[in-house]
Amino acid sequence: MLMQTDAPRAPADPVARRRTFAIISHPDAGKTTLTEKLLLFGGAIQLAGEVKAKRNRVSTRSDWMGIEKERGISVVTSVMTFEYGDCVFNLLDTPGHEDFSEDTYRTLTAVDSAVMVIDAAKGIEARTRKLFEVCRLRDIPIVTFVNKLDRESRDPFDLLDEIEKTLALDVAPVTWPIGRGRSFAGTYDLLRRRVRRLDAADDAGTVPVSGLDDPLFDTLLPEAGDAATWREEAELAEGGCKPFDLEAFREGHLTPVFFGSALRNFGVRDLIDGLAEVAPPPRGQDADIRAVSPTEPKMTGFVFKIQANMDPNHRDRIAFMRVCSGKLSRGMKARLVRTGKPISLSAPQFFFAQDRAIADEAYAGDVVGIPNHGTLRIGDTLTEGEELVFRGVPSFAPEILRRIKLTDAMKAKKLREALQQMAEEGVVQLFLPQDGSGAIVGVVGALQLDVLKERLQAEYGLPIDYEPTRFTICRWIEAEDQAELDKFIGSHGSSMASDLDGAPVFMATTGFSLRYEEERAPAIRFTDVKDYQ
Ligand code: G4P
């Protein structure tokens, strides 16, 4: 086996063969290119360039939003399912733009592992680091792909050192680059002593070598002295780096590292083989009353993403649900725990690179789209009847607050409904001030405001503008003693609002005034992250 591990491989077992993962990276490191190449391996797309084409073509699935087309950014999160070898992969895409980071964080609650893509010339960049921290909080194992070795790159040891130091993560190189930039000739598999040549006809073939002394390296690195220097480095990588350790990886302490070039479709097969072999199958999930194991027979799942209007011809709304246990069968009735009402799963869907198809059955680790007309919200739990709620789909205190200015006052009711919908989809957060003044919307990134404005106009015919509010910060408040909470709310009427769930929110004009209130009311907990309910 590639990494000489005893990772569970049971092709017949639908749970053991699932791999649900996301790619985390800084913009431009090569996430889109790598996604496309992974899908090619999975046979999900025929032609290179198809994922990228979403930016230009109207007909593809994920460019429904004008704003995405205009700015050439991927705003929406989506999921792509493909099979490769014995495994079913669910690749959850995350928005590249940091203004949509909330979406990304929520998506990371639904994966079991992540691929961290690093640009070989740039190393660890700001956004990679931030996303890594989110993965670490959830102990998500990370596989590293160092990309763009076909360009001038930094020294591989330097890169490994940076991963180790800045992320406090042990590194175990699985492959080692032979040359870099113009002299990049392939990779050497440190565990199996095989060479993958860049000039091979396809990415499939590897050549066995006797060891680092093999004359093949002199052919691949013909410049004087290059092969000798490389041998010294590779020897150091072989002997000096930590060996791959499955347990340390699964616990999130160690990352296997692959080198390659997504653009040249090089090293991608090693990466996908590595994921099949060592990335964890679906994990157990914590619910409020107990932990749920993926192998339990009854179906459970939670909604981490709502996406509207994926297809402009059909005004649909899709809730993305991660199945946590049991088997989801088409046509089954599930219980929506928040309302206690049944919901019929008559047309659950799987998503592929450009298509979707009805999912007849889905298992733990799978992500299915459930079409609905507003019944489902982010954070919802579905079960076969059990009264349990999955925790941990987060909502973050917004950093920008704006009051909505409606140009046509006759449409106030329609606006209220539309805002409620948008808030349920997670586009913005909605706060209704206790004093009855106009609704306030909150976002983490400014671009979300543009998306809201555009969608209100396009979907509801509501032209709006934004007005500043005197508030700049908001915090959810809680207290052990309900009387204390009521007292605080009562005495801060003009600074109180309620969120979508009716939870109390304190709004402050400055950081100073927030700290002042925090000091004066020690019985109250002010929080900037809340679980969806
Ligand atoms: P992102 O989704 O992480 O933002 O990155 P994306 O895949 O869009 O890649 C960013 C740029 O880097 C693209 O070039 C892409 O072609 C290039 N790239 C990705 N992988 C490699 C690689 O392995 N080697 C090299 N040399 N380049 C790579 P662009 O010029 O911005 O876009 P395009 O004009 O090529 O489409």
Image (cartoon, rainbow, N blue to C red):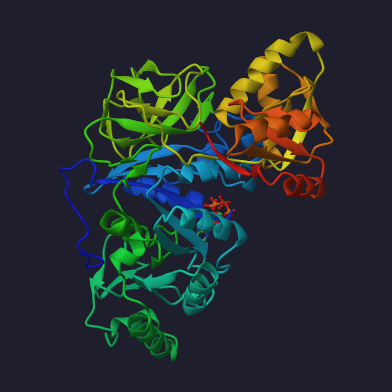
Between 487 and 389, the one nearer to me in the picture = 487
Residue farthest top in this picture: 410
- Tell me the residue at 28%/21% (across/down): 330
- Tell me the residue at 75%/37% (across/down): 507
User: Where 308 falls versus 171 (above or below)?
Assistant: above
- Inspect this view and state whether residue 49 appears: no
The answer to whether residue 60 is left or right of residue 272 is: right
Residue 249 percent coordinates (x, y)? 35, 63
Q: Quadrant of ligand 1?
A: bottom right
Q: Quadrant of residue 333?
A: top left
Q: Quadrant of residue 405?
A: top right
Between 161 and 326, the one nearer to me in the picture = 326
Count of labels in the image: 0
- Tell me the residue at 20%/55% (across/down): 8
Residue 484 percent coordinates (x, y)? 66, 35
User: Where 99 falls versus 493 (above or below)?
Assistant: below
User: Where 276 falls versus 79 (above or below)?
Assistant: below
Residue 282 percent coordinates (x, y)? 31, 46
- Tell me the residue at 24%/71% (across/down): 207
If the image is split into quadrants, where does the N terminus sit? bottom left
Q: Quadrant of residue 433?
A: top right
Residue 3 percent coordinates (x, y)? 26, 67
The answer to whether residue 355 is left or right of residue 326 is: right
User: Where 32 falls versus 371 (above or below)?
Assistant: below
Between 267 and 297, the one nearer to me in the picture = 297
- Inspect this view and state whether residue 115 appears: yes
The answer to whether residue 517 is left or right of residue 154 is: right
The answer to whether residue 163 is left or right of residue 265 is: right
